[in-house]
Image (cartoon, grey):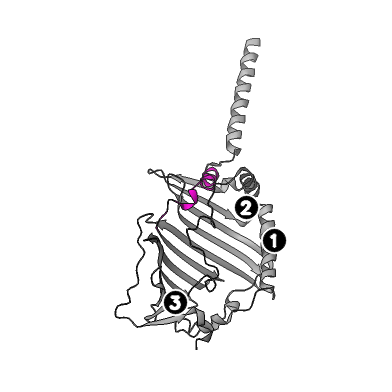
């Protein structure tokens, strides 16, 4: 009898341990995706010093209450040749049904060329110095931009802000060593620290709107160009309601593709926000965007060819005198 009771006790202990282990694994957070996300932030990419040229593709859309306000697609090429930094790019967008296409070419020799592809018009911008360019800095200036790994303090702050959202991260490993990291967050999952930060950002945005400077006269001059004609009648304030009450993030989705060295190759994001305007009307705003980098150290920016084209000069030094 005692022997039987001994086996029962042993069986009970083994069963309890098995149940405890299964329960522990069932409720242990799966942080594999979050750890992969942090690995990207902690990687040191040497301030992009190894990126002499690249191609960047991107798209963006803005929808308000189910109506598309803006949809844009763009491609940019950056590279260095002969000691000069060259840039070329194309931008196509549709703003409230009005379509526009433009291209830009920038080189050390000819300055900046702008092409209005919608109307087949060509412009050369001259005297674009630092003063008129808004103290423009070179995109590869190492002194102005330092890409560094995330330190311990920043990591601890990130862990605190993310909180229980670590389970919302996932990672898919590819055969070539690259990874796709995804975070998907719904309204109910957003932790209190992030909600407090969102409220603070909303309050700061209201202050910024109240103290926003008046538009410079140069914008009025630019409006005379055919490229902008047809856009001036669009009332963006009416299309983009100012959310003042019950502002909430309904859904956030971010997907990153990184290579085997944890360098970001592409990013795709979705953000859905709801709230009420001053009149108490509820609105829902959705933003979607994506971008990817390719052709690293294998990109040659396109060069502008003025042959056979009528090119109008825009002298920034006397811009205010343009009629």
> In front of the other: label 3 or label 1?
3
Q: Is residue 299 above or below residue 11?
A: below
Magenta stretch encompasses residue 277: no
Looking at the figure, which quarter contains the N terminus? top right
Residue 30 lies in quadrant: top right
**Which label's residue is closer to the chain start, 3 or 1?**
3
Label 2 crowd (10 A; few <14 / some 14-19 / many >=20) = some
**Which label's residue is closer to the chain start, 3 or 2?**
3
Label 3 crowd (10 A; few <14 / some 14-19 / many >=20) = some
Q: Which residues are magenta?
A: 34-53
Residue 272 x/y as whole percent: 57, 63
Q: Which residue is mark 2?
A: 189
Q: Which residue is mark 1?
A: 200
Q: Which residue is mark 3?
A: 125
Q: Secondary structure at mark 3?
A: strand
Residue 235 x/y as whole percent: 57, 81
**Distance from the alpha carbon under mark 1 to that under mark 2:** 19 Å
Magenta stretch encompasses residue 48: yes
């Amino acid at each position: 009898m005692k022997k039987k009771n001994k086996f029962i006790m042993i069986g009970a202990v083994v069963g309890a341990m098995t149940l405890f282990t299964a329960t522990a694994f069932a409720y242990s957070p799966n942080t594999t995706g979050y750890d992969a996300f942090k690995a990207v932030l902690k990687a040191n990419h040497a301030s992009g010093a190894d990126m002499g040229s690249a191609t960047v593709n991107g798209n963006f859309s803005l929808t308000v209450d189910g109506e598309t306000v803006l949809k844009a697609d763009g491609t940019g090429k950056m590279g260095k040749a002969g000691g000069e930094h060259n840039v070329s790019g194309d931008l196509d967008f549709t703003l409230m049904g009005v379509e526009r296409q433009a291209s830009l070419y920038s080189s050390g020799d000819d300055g900046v060329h702008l092409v209005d592809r919608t109307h087949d018009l060509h412009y050369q911008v001259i005297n674009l110095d630092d003063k008129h360019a808004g103290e423009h800095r070179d995109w590869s200036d190492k002194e102005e931009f330092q890409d560094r790994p995330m330190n311990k303090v920043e990591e601890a702050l990130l862990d605190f802000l993310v909180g229980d959202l670590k389970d919302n991260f996932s990672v898919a490993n590819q055969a070539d060593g690259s990874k796709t990291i995804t975070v998907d967050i719904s309204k109910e999952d957003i932790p209190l620290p992030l909600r407090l930060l969102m409220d603070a950002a909303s309050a700061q945005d209201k202050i910024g709107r109240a103290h926003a400077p008046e538009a410079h006269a140069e914008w009025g001059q630019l409006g005379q160009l055919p490229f902008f004609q047809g856009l001036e009648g669009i009332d963006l304030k009416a299309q983009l309601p100012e959310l003042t009450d019950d502002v909430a993030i309904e859904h956030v989705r971010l997907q990153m593709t990184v290579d085997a060295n944890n360098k970001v190759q592409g990013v795709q994001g979705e953000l859905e926000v709801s709230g009420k305007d001053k009149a108490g009307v509820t609105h829902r705003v959705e933003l979607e965007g994506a971008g990817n980098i390719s052709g690293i150290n294998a990109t040659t920016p396109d060069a502008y060819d003025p042959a056979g084209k009528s090119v109008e000069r825009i002298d920034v030094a006397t811009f205010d005198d343009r009629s």
